[in-house]
Image (cartoon, coloured by chain):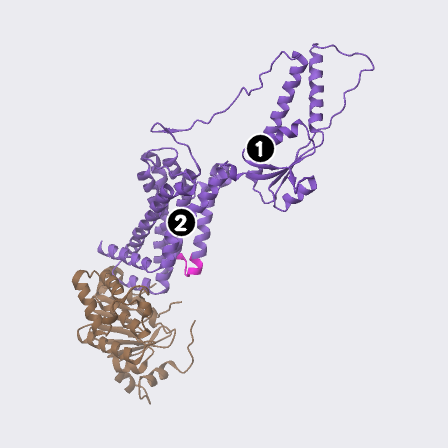
Amino acid sequence: MYSLNAVSLDINQGQIFGLLGPNGAGKTTLISLLCGLIKPTSGHFSIDDLNYSNHASKIKKIIGVVPQEYALYPTLTARENLHYFGSMYGLKGNHLKDKVIETLDLLGLLKFADKRIDTFSGGMKRRVNLIAGILHNPKVLFLDEPTVGVDVHSKNAIIDYLKFLNQNGTTIIYTSHHLAEAEDFCTNIAILDQGQIYAKGTPKALIDGTENARNLEDVFISLTGKELRDDV
Amino acid sequence: MYKIWMSVVKEFLLLKRDLGGLIILFIMPLVLVITVTLIQDSAFKTISDNKIPILLVDNDNGSVSKSVFENLEKSNLFSVITQIDNKPITEEVAKEAVYKGKFQLAIIIPKNLSIDLQTKIDQNVQNIVSKMGLTETDTSAQAEKPKVIKEKEVKLYFDPAVQMSFKNAVMSSIDKMISQIETKSIYTTFQNQLGEGNVQFEQKSFITFKEIIPRINNKDVLPNSVQHNVPAWTLFAIFFIVIPLSINIVKEKSQGTFVRLLTNPVSNLIVIIGKTITYSIICMIQFYMMVAVAIFLFPHIGLPPLNIEGHLFLMSIVALFSGFAAIGFGILLGTVATTQEQSAPFGATSVLILAAIGGVWVPVFAMPKIMQYIAKSSPMNWGLEAFYDVLLRNVSFVEIIPKISLLFLFFIITTSIALFYDKKKRTV
């Protein structure tokens, strides 16, 4: 069941925008809409001044998506996976080969380039999953829980690389349950619950604007309550 | 084009890394075609080591039972057993042995069959000859009344497990045998009554039949089990591509790669074209492997070789279009199914059903009327008929166009439904 109501958001170029919310809040639905995975029944959105309903194909060329699942072929090697997904963005030849080598190296995976994905640890898979979404240097990068279930070293490598991408002009939109990570990483945040935006702003502004809040977690609890949000 | 090429490369890499899948794709169809053709061929053969043992209980001990025994032995289909453990078989023993499946058939010749048959024929012939005034008629009141002869029954016991077609074939040949014995006896009796040994009746059949075998390139084309079975089971194997293909698509969905592809600037159509090309190549490799086995291996295992003289090109076209139909079905199944547990059993069962209605096991003409209509809607029937047209009926390309067009149309319709279904499903 997908449900988003009256969500209105402006995300500026160069931001690292965090979409935070409890389970079932609508974060993944919102990301799926923005990536073109599902179509809205009403409303509209545009990326880089391109309306999705008219320019889906153009938008897909300038966005990168890193889904929550590993979304890789387990029996193919890291290099084979990346060559394939890179080619789907129109990359080819030496440019593609060099880009794969460069990013694998940056994320510490070059020596495992020719190993099958099903032999990789969770952290290694997460890093390959990330590379598959950024080979074409997207203007906007969507990440759905990019650090879930990974070790500290892999998490740091991923966050550092995302910061590097952002410094080079990529706008990042990401969802996470790690509030401390989001507080440190994001330039802007929206807290989403029950399909609606409850608050948005910089992490500092949100903390300062909430009574007795010392960190983003306090803001989050204050806005969404302490009730368990199990969702099936 | 580059995206399609890379999709094909990816599909082949995935297959290369899946040993089990490769065995299913290439080895199992070969095992299937060899096994089925061997079994079917033995059913066609009448070689001595292939005779079916049957029991004959002779309560008659006369000329008729002797004739039945000789005819059965001569038929080359049966080896007749009249004794078990050096003792003559009784009806009870025969019945039990057959019902327990030790033998498939027992024939019980009733007591006095020869004597009673001859008496009955004598009476009938005497009656006719008298009415024609050819012999003196005894008009005295003391004339002996003709003895009443009851009809005789030859009993047949069949193993309950034997198939109806086998039963019908056996009953028909025994019926024919008995009719011939009866006719021969009638002729002989007439001859004795009329000719006093001088008149000879021609007892040879006046009407005979001869099968006219089609000739292609001045050579007789004698259909055999291989010519029938190889196209049928090759088609069956080609359709089994539905299972690995649907599993491949379900896996793409479950491991998330399908979601990633949807976010890439590549249409679902490109992904499907990539899969279609890959699996079409696999279908053709399967086809050529099976044809090669039928041509080169079959003669070494006691089977006649497949004769494809001048037909390989048209057969390849039929195989390709059959492959398209199977791929379309696999794409649709993989798109609709959400788990491998749904797609694999459904794929296997539906291929079996399509084969059954398509005439792979039982010829369509032998099916009930309603099933014949249904058969006409089975892609496997279109493929099978196209193969038979090429291989056995020696038709030209133009004549197979309607059938291969139907196969291609099936591919287009199933693929379009899959694309439409996927698009609909993703709309909130």
**First to last magenta residue range:** B335-343
Q: Is residue B328 magenta?
A: no
Residue B36: image x %, image y %? 45, 45
Chain under disc 2: B
Task: Tell me the crowding category of disc 2: few under 14, some 14 to 19, or many 20 or more residues within 10 angstroms, Cα based.
Answer: many
Left/right of residue B31 with respect to residue A38 in the rendered view = right
**Quarter of the image that includes the N terminus of chain A:** bottom left
Q: Is residue B341 magenta?
A: yes
Q: CA distance from mark 2 to mark 1?
A: 39 Å
Nearest the eye: B147 or B305: B305
Chain under disc 1: B
Residue B404: image x %, image y %? 35, 41
Residue B385: image x %, image y %? 40, 38
Chain identifier, purple in the render: B
Chain identifier, brown in the render: A
Residue tagged by mark 1? Answer: B73
Quadrant location of residue B316? top left
Mark 2 or 1, nearer chain start: 2
Q: Secondary structure at mark 1?
A: helix
- Residue at the image position 46 percent from the left and 40 percent from the top: B41
Magenta segment, prevailing SS (helix, strand or loop)? helix
- Residue at the image position 29 percent from the left and 83 percent from the top: A206
- Residue at the image position 32 percent from the left and 88 percent from the top: A213
Residue tagged by mark 2? Answer: B29
**Quarter of the image that includes the C terminus of chain A:** bottom left
Dot in front, 2 or 1: 1
